[in-house]
Amino acid sequence: MSSNKRTCNGSGSKNGRRKMPKIRSIQEMMRASSPVHAIKECTNCNATDTSLWHDGPAGPKSLCHRCFMRIRKQKLNELIAARKIQNDNEAAATLLLLSKSR
């Protein structure tokens, strides 16, 4: 006994087979996702012309070279200052221990 009733299988098709979406080529996907004449702009200084774009806090290639170098130098100077303070504190603690032991 066969029945002509069809049950819903959630695929939205009558015969139970799902239709596969068309696979677009990579070139088509790239053209669709990125504007042709997009102008890059530094998220820090709004510069549009630079020799090299760098990854920044806003994502890949969001900082111009000048801002990247300035931020890198600031971070390096902060690290050096923090290490100097740490070394000074360790030296002061050592001197304090030596003076108490006498």
Image: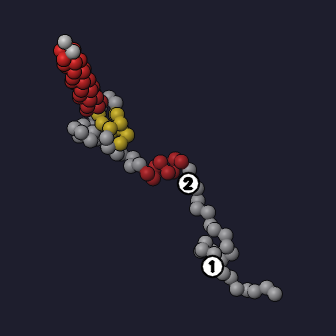
Asked if residue 52 shows in the view, the reply is yes
In this image, 6 relative to 56: left or right?
A: right
State the mark number for residue 8: 1
In this image, 17 relative to 55: left or right?
A: right
In this image, 23 relative to 56: left or right?
A: right
Of 4 and 50, nearer the camera is 4
Q: Residue at x 38, y 49 (%)?
A: 35
State the mark number for residue 24: 2
Q: How is the image coloured?
A: secondary structure
> For the residue marked with disc 1, what is the amino acid?
Cys
Asked if residue 84 shows in the view, the reply is no
Q: Residue at x 35, y 42 (%)?
A: 59
**Distance (Cα) linking label 1 and label 2:** 29 Å
Q: In the displayed image of the protein, which residue is found farthest to the top? A: 102
> For the residue marked with disc 2, what is the amino acid?
Arg
Label 2: element kind: loop
Q: Residue at x 63, y 68 (%)?
A: 18
Quadrant for the C terminus in the image: top left
Quarter of the rendering containing residue 19: bottom right
State the mark number for residue 18: none
